[in-house]
Amino acid sequence: MLLMILMLTFTSGCWDVRELSDLGITVALGLDKKGDEFNVAVQVVNPGEISRISGGAGTKKPVTVYEETGETITEAFRKILTTSPNNIYLSHVRVVVIGEELAKDRMKYVLDFISRNHEFRTDFFLIVAKDSTADTILKVMTATENVPANKIYESLEKSEELYAPTKAVTLDDLKMDLLNKGKQPVLTGIRLIGDEDRAASEENVKNLKNTSKLKYENLAVFKKDRLIGWLSEDESKGYNYLINNVVRANGVVTCPDGGKLGMNLIKTKTKLQSEFTGDQPIMNIEITGEGNIDEVSCGIDITKQDNIAKLEQIWNQRITSLCLKAVDSAQEEFQSDIFGFGEVIHRQHPRKWKPLKDHWDEEFKDLEVKVTTKLKIRRFGTITDSIVSELE
Amino acid sequence: MWKVIGLLLVSAAIVQFEYSHLKKIRNRMDRWSFAVLLGVGLMLSIMKMYDVPLFNPLQAIEFIYKPIYENVFNRVL
Amino acid sequence: MLEKGRISVAQFTILIFLVTTGDSILVLPSSVAGEAKNDAWLSGIFALGIGLLLVLLFYQVSKLFPDLTFVEYSDRIFGSFLGKVLAGFFLLYPFLSVALLLRELGDFLTTQILPHTPIEAITILFMVFVIYGTRLGLETWVRAGQVFLPFFLLLVVLFFAFLAPQFHLDNIKPILGEGVKPMLRGSLTFIAFPFMETLIVLIMIFPYVKIKKQIELRNAMLIAQTAGGTLLILMMLTALLVFGGELVAHQQYPSYSLAKKINIGKFLERIEAIIAILWLITIFIKATFYFYSSTLGLAQLLRLQDYRPLTFPLGIIAIVLSIEVSPSITYYNEVISKYWPLFDFTMSLIFIPLILVFGLFYLKNN
């Protein structure tokens, strides 16, 4: 019996056998719109170069970018096969970069292609190339990593954890948002800083001080599958607070007498509650959390309880205003419920959600949103009173 | 063409395999049912290889139950 | 007596458990979630209740002729001509199911794992194993299930444990937000695929279980169906907690997508191919169960002395059927999720009670 199963698993593999050396392991995919056609760029690992680099004699690029244009994404892929020496293998894709123009226009076809193809896994991140095309982003190489796509992937993961204005979105997250009537998707943007022409050159890698870099920039707001605009940095931060996506973050608090104070947020939790007055929904948002002071650059005496209370108040006001800014711009500028307030109402008041469901966009515009923050300062690092206030 | 020859070879192997076994069984019905079913199987396979349209039993299921699904199930629930 | 082997009550329980899980573990979540969305797990609980009630009905049927299969006693209760016709009609059910299972397995493997492999290569190979199992006799292939069971349970436990970190309780809220209707619509397939499809064909297996009292059969069926049903409900719940109702409904094989999501500390990941063995085991047992029942039944119907010579010819026909039944996956999905369950309902709620009524009538007069 065991033999039967063994044979069953091994013998059936022959048709699909592909030797490792024939695979062009693709780590990043860039999709753009070119007129009516799709432009596809793939970043393929060059296995020989990777090992040579670790041996210290790397001269060529560790990855190669191929790109082609086709009427469908698949056609572009087929064309890439004619230029690339290896088969394009998609199971190891870490990031999919979508050009801003494409994101504004026909994102859904991209999603369809990616979901339909069996080689894709679902754990890669999707990002939007802000003010740029996806293939440019892919061509930019960085000095810190041998495989640039891995660099993009890891820095997005870290940035989501440590710094508030980005959000790592996987394919499943995005599809869940698109299928949900009460929530609109967002994606993180990536932008090229510096000289575009030099970015792709090998020189950029060799220079210790990069002249061109990639930087994550805020969140792109979607309405259904179309990109309709960008949140500012403050709004992006507010967005993450509102959807309970802040793990750790740094904040700046203005001291009562001027000067600044650095705050390190260690845990936050956001609770979304919906209620109704008559037929009018109201969202109550409560953010609770704790923070540590990690830098004092003003003359405040933080050993005094009064001062801590004052700082807490200022800090709370600041976070509240970030959140309200995000809500305002989503309601007025974009009219797109990126926070999933509709979904919260759906969960908590399924019956009252029904009449709202089909024209939620208009309802969302006039939704009353109340934000309360209860952030507490817990600790202040390894010294008590600031040296700054001693010196003054 | 090669497929058909392959199929016939496989069937010959099956007949050879079952022959000694069938010989011991006195019942003529056993031999006949084996022969008839194998013949039907072969015929269907060859027809399929030459893309002769066959009857799909699911069409019968669809024919019977589609009206029931649409008129009864969809109305009740 | 065509089949001399006997299985124990424990083996009988394991058999029903594995057949109940069968292909349902792979394809069921999608079709139920298509109707019931995030209440699909409630459909499962409802369906399990109905399934257990059905067990009581089938238990009554098993009491009619404790030593005979349905094909053997059908000409007694229905008369020799009608009896043969009805028995022949009944045998079409498991036989057609074999073809459908082959197709399902072939479609799954060609879509997800081996896209360039011709589907015939997969179905023929699988059919060869099913034929092999069938020829070895009831006792042997049921024991194969018994051997697989620990591996199967181990994989299942690991599967749920690995996915637990990705559960989002919000995904199944609101509970019954759209009322009970979608939940009931979803339970159509949930009742038909795991529960009915198992029970109907059991009337070919009942006499081969070693029992002292008939009631043991009922208890075995109740235990096995509860265990199998619970496993399916857990699978459904897991899919919903990870993906949410909408996304489950949009997938062809939600359980496989779940396996793809397993990622423990960036270390234990990409193990979906191992998890897929889980479905190969249950589909193999279910397919053998059907194929065995239909060959044995046909041999009994034709009063042959051995059913083994029929296996190869019927196997060939099953393979041709498996290719013929589905001109495209769209057609297949529609028929299987909408009309085939109604066929299951007809078989178990009209055909089986018919046997029961005629059987009781016969026993009363003789």
Image (cartoon, coloured by chain):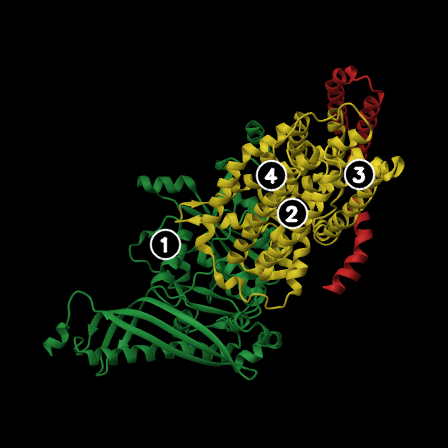
Chain colours: A green, B red, C yellow
Quadrant (top left/top right/bottom left/bottom right) for the N terminus of chain C: top right
- Amino acid on which the number 3 mark rests in the picture: Asp
Nearer to the camera, C108 or B9: C108
Specify the subunit that label 4 lies on. Answer: C
Q: Residues within 10 Å of mark 3 (few under 14, many from 20)?
A: few
The disc at residue A142 is: 1
From mark 3 to mark 4, how far is it between C-alphas? Answer: 44 Å
Q: With respect to residue A106, does B48 lie above or below? A: above
Question: Is there one chain holding both mark 3 and mark 4?
Answer: no
**Residue bearing mark 4:** C13
- Amino acid on which the number 2 mark rests in the picture: Pro
Q: Position of residue A229 (x, y in %)?
A: 49, 72
From mark 1 to mark 3, how far is it between C-alphas? Answer: 56 Å
- Amino acid on which the number 4 mark rests in the picture: Thr
Left or right: A17 in relation to C214 = left
From mark 4 to mark 1, how far is it between C-alphas? Answer: 61 Å
Q: Position of residue A329 (x, y in %)?
A: 46, 78
**Residue bearing mark 3:** B51
Q: Position of residue C144 (x, y in %)?
A: 58, 31
From mark 2 to mark 4, how far is it between C-alphas? Answer: 15 Å
From mark 1 to mark 2, how far is it between C-alphas? Answer: 54 Å
| Nearer mark to the viewer, of 1 and 3 | 3
Question: Is there one chain holding both mark 4 and mark 1?
Answer: no
**Residue bearing mark 2:** C194
Specify the subunit that label 1 lies on. Answer: A
| Nearer mark to the viewer, of 2 and 3 | 2
